[in-house]
Image (cartoon, helix red, strand yellow):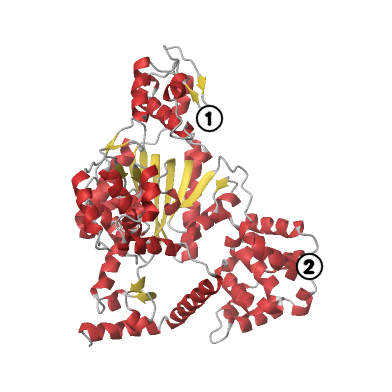
Amino acid sequence: MWHGPEGQVYQVQKLLSKEWYKVRVLADLQHYGFEAREEEGKVMIADFNRSIFEIIRENPAPFIFEKLGEWYHHFLFDEFQDTSILQWQNFLPLIDNALAKGKKSLVVGDGKQAIYRWRNGEVAQFSSLPQIYKPMSETAHLYQSALRREFAAEELEYNWRSAREVVDFNNELYSTLLEVMPELEDEYSKGLKQKPARDIAGFVSVERLEAGTSIEREALASAAVLEKVHACLEDDFRPGDITVLTRGNKEAQKIAEYLVQNEISVVTAEALKLNNSAAVRLIISLAGVLHESTREIHKANFISCLSKLDPKSYPHYDTIKPLIFWKDKTSSVKANVIINKLAPLGLLESMTMYELAEWAVKSFNLTAVNPSFVDAILNVIQSRGSVSPHEFLEWWNDRGDRQFVDSSDATGGVQVMTIHKSKGLEFPVVIYAMMVKQDMSSDFWLEGREDITGLPAVPLKVSASSAKKLTPEFLEERKRQLVDDVNANYVATTRAVNRLHWLFVRSVNRMQNELAATLEEVFASLSKSWVDDQLLEFGTKQKFIPEMDEEDHAESPYPTQPIRTNKNILLEKVKADRGISEESLQGTTIHDVLASIKQRDHVDIDKLFERYAPVFSPEDIEAMKAHVT
């Protein structure tokens, strides 16, 4: 058994040998990318932060910031937990300059919502404030003293988004997770428990679902989502009130397709791209197979698409299955045999693109897989006229990524999105479809070992057994991945205003990752028992009454006088018992006034506030002027 540095190098090289193809591709990309930038005199956007830092490191008061520092006095850094170390340290000279002039800067963030580490977000620098986390220059200590001197931390006590039941559920869930997962200490030990600020009806359900294969789990999750959507609609929620969250685009795509097939209007971007459907890609790959220059690539795509279709969907599956998974045969050989079994290649080459697509739909029964997507691609092909497969493929390569399934109501449908897209948003109803994955191995990017790899970073697939033999960095990475997973769940479960439906979809063999296993234990501790070993519920379902509807139908004892601003925003003098506080109305007004200012040196504050005189008292007007000036 190898131990120590030599043993760790051996283990890294052993893992690299299994990923050699990826390493070679990365090396080629790095080489050709550098070559192209040199030849064309271009710079990647990602390189700008590094270039700015090199200037800052040489000069604590760089010229490039002089004009910015004179023009902007206050700085707001939102979602700070997802800011990279380089980005933050590049801004330090500006912040230091503003603080020296007596101006204020605001850093806003929540370590529990740090989900962009893969984009170099570093949550540790948020929890380290006012310390500068991993200072990268000798001038950093100059800025750190100013941060320490002016730093004041404030934790927000109230939750202004969610109903009490949703807030209480999240408080209990993540407090219990913190007790059993020491990895969460840094991000979850402060500001975890919140108080609900809104008196509205809330409901939370956690439903455990089991199925065998991944295809069966996807089908089960989609059906469960549809059931929850129908239940919410029956309780007077509108389609636009409902949002389905998934971890990845693939799951979002499957669920969106299923909802559309079941006549539920869906609003989404990535999930309804035609390119995201295996059925559509199969049709496109067939067109490519008929074209000499792209034939081999499209044969591989053709086999890949076939393997992803539901076996029960097409009539020739029993004949084709052994060929799809034919060992020791290339994709080219497999594709040739499969296509020739179904039709002579010469016959396909004589077809127009529309005829070829119809043949593919019939041969593989694609309407049983993705009917909405198949209809959409046939309509797109038909709109191009009697073009050949080669002509259509040229057009598709340029425009295909912009073709979508047409949703019947793009403004009022059920939203389907990934957790990352939902960040910072809120929805009356959240249906979170969590697809539990088995923790058989973990992808890991090894950095800082160019002595071994020749690259800044390389991908490795590390199993639980091999991780124990590797450097502490591997074990630290696994810990951070676990925290990333908890954070993603935190974002998903805190988006709901009124209802949260959590679908916990796992494999029937009960093999699951560490977080999923821990969550099951925590769920059990939050309730005395599961209903039929499947369902947990918190709160009581009630019919949905939109807050705006309540206001629209309430009779006010106070006279109102509408005023239309330059942005067509209708303001009314509304008292607190109508549901909107004076403070909120004043805040909206100040925001509107600031937005109307075009040049700071030519501002008539008195004139800007004239149009609000019928809405607010003179005292309130003066108070708002003070905020603006």
Name which residue type carries label 1: Lys
Above or below, 162 relative to 32: above
Name which residue type carries label 2: Thr
Q: CA distance from mark 2 to mark 1?
A: 53 Å
Above or below, 464 relative to 524: below
Earlier in the chain: of badge 2 and badge 1, it is 2
Q: Which part of the image, by quadrant, shows the C terminus? A: top left
Residue 420 position within the rendered picture, expressed as x and y whole percent measured from the top left: 42, 53
Instruction: Place residue 458 in its image quadrant.
Output: bottom left
- Which residue: 43% across, 47% down? 431
Q: Which residue is mark 1?
A: 567
Mark in the foreground, 2 or 1: 1
Camera-nearest residue between 231 and 559:
559
Q: Secondary structure at mark 1?
A: loop
Instruction: Using residue 60 as the reference point, say whether residue 279 is left or right of it.
Output: right
Instruction: Place residue 48 in its image quadrant.
Output: bottom left
Q: Secondary structure at mark 2?
A: loop
Above or below, 627 relative to 154: above
Question: Mark 2 touching mark 1, by CB under 8 A?
Answer: no
Residues packed near mark 2 inside 10 Å, few (<14), some (14 to 19) or many (20 plus): many
Residue 482 position within the rendered picture, expressed as x and y whole percent measured from the top left: 30, 62
Residue 323 position within the rendered picture, expressed as x and y whole percent measured from the top left: 60, 80
Q: Which residue is mark 2?
A: 352
Asked if residue 595 can be seen in this view, the reply is yes
Camera-nearest residue between 421 and 50:
50
Asked if residue 365 can be seen in this view, the reply is no
Instruction: Using residue 426 as the reference point, say whether residue 328 is left or right of it.
Output: right
